[in-house]
Amino acid sequence: MPVRSKPAETSDPRLARRSFLGIGAALTGSLALGVRPGHAQPASPPAEPPWSQSIGPGVVDRPYGRPADAEADVIRRNVPWLTAGTESSISFSPLQSLHGIITPNGLFFERYHSGRPDVDPDQHRLMIHGLVERPLILTMKDIVRFPSVSRIHFIECPANGGMEWRAAQLNSLQFNHGMISCAEWTGVRLSTLLEEVGVKKEAAWAMVEGADGAHMNRSLPLHKCLDDCLVVYAQNGEALRPEQGYPLRLVVPGWEGNVSIKWLRRIKLGDRPWYSREETSKYTDLMPDGTSRGFTWLIDAKSVITFPCPEKPLSGPGLYEIRGLAWTGNGKVKRVDVSTDGGVNWQTARLHEPVLSKALTKFTLPWRWDGRPALLESRVIDETGYVQPTIAQLRKQRGSNSVYHNNSIQTWQVKPDGSVFDVQLA
Amino acid sequence: MFNSRNRAMLLAAAVAAVATAAGAAEPGYYGYGKIASPEEIAGWNIDVRGDDGAGLPPGSGTVARGTEVFSEQCASCHGTFGEGEGRFPKLAGGMGTLKHDRPELTVGSYWPFAPTLFDYINRAMPMQAPHTLSADDVYALTAYILNLNDIVPNEFVADQDSLAKVKMPNRDSFVWTDPRPDTMAKPCMSACANPADVKIVSTAEGRDLTPRTTGPLDTMQPK
């Protein structure tokens, strides 16, 4: 039943309560009679709904489909005060409304440094040069001819959760965790392209560069390029979206999203890294002693409970399914544990198939809520045995001047009224 | 029924398939695309290596020229002296703050390599018209921003040789190998803490920093 203004979905629980007592009460009354808000006619049993007594639009009414109108709230959103403008900025996937490990293409998070370029695929070229035998220029048609592979991988911006280093700040799953998305990518192995150009013996690094205004560029060690990197033109079965790099992007599985260069136009091999602005001024980690770490590419294991969450509170005591997502740049998720008492006791959650390397993995755990305050947490263990830390454990090493690579355990505080808040524990 | 020519072709195909699967195809095996000419490469070959300036183009620029170009092309966002308008990045200052509670990361206080500054301005700035400046102007802007940070004197001329020789104040503070994992927690399952010690030390409740996640996009600014 697509009731849009369900009071429990209001992000501010005070408002939720108010509307529940006010408008909500009126709604509840009319719902009991089967009246859809905004519709004069009753539509729930025993009434026969109007959509069952009429004929709908025909095929190709929407030649390219779109979500139901009632799902209009499920969109990427930004934090306007975070950046000077929207051209070098970030938007967040609405994880609170997603149900699987694949992010729909229109909801995949965005990160631009110079806006979203409008690239002409016929004129787009990939140039591969530097320490190679045969410097090449490839068209999109050329690239699609190479042997193709499809792989499911997440991409996470390492700044995901970066606003929570000092304290709990944003009361939202979307804004604290939505810089991650996962898709099936189709393209050619980067190793295939590098074999085709012939890598010279001295080569040890690659510089990868985009065709956007930022000419975004990063250095990658050659061993990673030859291991599992993909040069892709498709995302979840259709051409890449412009937001994700149309017509061509790099996917560097398990590593921070910034290296998965979008609108990929150039790969240059060299013997040393480039130390570009994006791997010196940015995407480095300032430590408490004033030193900084560079080339910290790996996405450490992380998990989060996606239901309940601030956006999706509980609607009264009873049986629920705690749901969440886990991932690791190290490979596969091995186990996820869930606590409802702030980490005192843990229960192992069920992992849902497929459990894929460097992809989102879904977990669930049934939970009977007694209506008392609770502190919900999830903790992932990956196939290397690495255990997701608490924010306190991580801060002990990293201090709180970091921006990137906060993979700590998220704590959701559940209040007796079912509302959920982002908190941090001692 | 294969004649010997067919058999040879099949064998060749099988060998090629194995070679590809094993990741050992000869360069040019597919033969797609075209060889990049030196002119084509030159047009896109803009990268400059940070630590030694490899790739810096011919040309030069003074601090004085940089002052002019900066006020025309950059000051609207970054402020006349690189102080940063609104939320636009500050390009100068913050020296010695890296251990502070609120460190200020700028070109002067944080960046390890001067040639990276040339590379970034050249590839990405000015924001609304990236990669439109002449090499001389990019050198001049680089000189101006380094001068704003008291890293080079007023008479400094930036060029292929001089930039790589500039030693940035924070150069030696970077570690370029990843020491993680940071933590080696054990996955305790029960009575992992004293329930009395489980205390909320911070909450996002009531902070008024969170945009709406329903309805139209929020334009909120913190109060």
Image: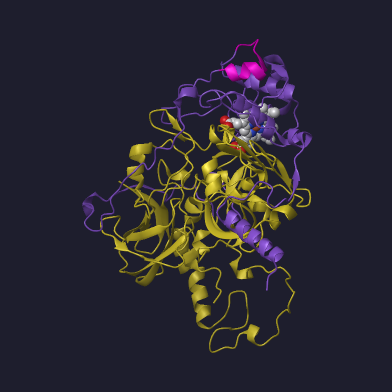
Chain colours: A yellow, B purple
Q: Front-most of B55 and B113? A: B55
In the image, residue B142 sits, relative to residue A219, either above or below, namely: above
User: For the point 66% across and 19% down, which residue is it?
Assistant: B160
Q: Front-most of A110 and B32? A: B32
Q: Front-most of B133 and A274? A: A274
Is residue B158 among the parts visible in the rendering? yes
Instruction: Answer whether residue A364 is magenta in the image.
Output: no
**Quarter in which the N terminus of chain A is drawn:** bottom right
x then y, percent, for residue A350: 37, 67
User: For the point 71% across and 63% down, which residue is it?
Assistant: B5
Instruction: Answer whether residue B163 is magenta in the image.
Output: yes
Q: How many marks?
A: 0
Q: Which residues are magenta?
A: B153-166
Is residue B214 among the parts visible in the rendering? no
User: For the point 45% across and 52% down, which residue is it?
Assistant: A171
x then y, percent, for residue A129: 67, 38
User: For the point 35% across and 48% down, which residue is it?
Assistant: A389
In the image, residue A289 sits, relative to residue A12, either above or below, namely: above
x then y, percent, for residue B200: 32, 49
Q: Front-most of A123 and B72? A: A123
Q: Quadrant of residue B38?
A: top right
Left or right, A184 with respect to B127, comes to left
x then y, percent, for residue B114: 59, 23
